[in-house]
Image (spheres, rainbow, N blue to C red):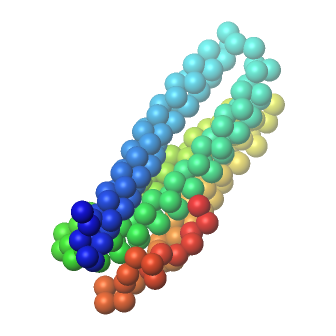
Amino acid sequence: MTDADGSDHLRTAYDQLCTSYHAIDDFRAKLLGFLPLVTGGGLILLTGRADELRREFFGPVGLLGIAVTLGLLAYELAGIRRCLALIDDGHVFETDMHLQRGQFIRRGDAFRFITKSFAAAWIYPAVLAAWIYLALFVNHRVLGEVISPIVFVAGFVGILLYDQSLRKKAKPDPPAATSIPSARRDRGG
């Protein structure tokens, strides 16, 4: 049986939102830990045995690494957008349910800039720069030494700016003005 004000439906929707948020957040965290481990291991294996391996494979393997990293980065950027939208919606739910200490109202980050987005801004550009260096290692090593740091810095700044722009858009409405239908905004994904 449902309350007259629909609080059972509100609670069910909130629970589903929390489940979705934690699933995306958990997958992103695992990927952030796994990607550098696999990349580092692969690069050490390849460059550590550079004399034993056929160097003509470095370019194609580097290009494959670049492609895979860019694909995972695109997925990560979509994950950032979805998580921020869920945080915004969760804040609205918690406000409407009159929660004082909900997980979305009180994020509790001691260091607000150290987030998964900040970690992604370090990891993805670093991995991408490493694959670029490998792709250029044999025939254009000096070019790789120049391009790789540029890619890292540009990627780092780009991801942080993307995250910051999403956070500005995702600021929840003031508590007095919130309600589930009016506070929801189309986020495109």
Residue 133 placement (x, y as % from top left): 68, 37
**Front residue (pair 113, 133):** 113
Image position, residue 115 (x, y; %): 38, 58
Front one among 107 and 158: 107
Residue that extends furthest to the bottom in the rendered view of this protein: 176
Q: How many marks?
A: 0
Residue 90's place in the image compared with 70, above or below, is: below
- Identify the residue at image location x=62%, y=22%: 47
Which residue appears at 24% of the width and 63% of the height?
Answer: 1
Residue at point 41%, 52% (across, down): 20
**Percent from the top left, x then y, of residue 38?**
52, 28
**Camera-side residue of 78 and 139:** 78
Q: Residue at x 63, y 59 (%)?
A: 154
Counting from the top left corner in percent of width and height, residue 96 is at 29, 77
Residue 134, compared with residue 124, is above or below; it is above
Residue 52: quarter of image: top right
The foreground one among 73 and 106 is: 106
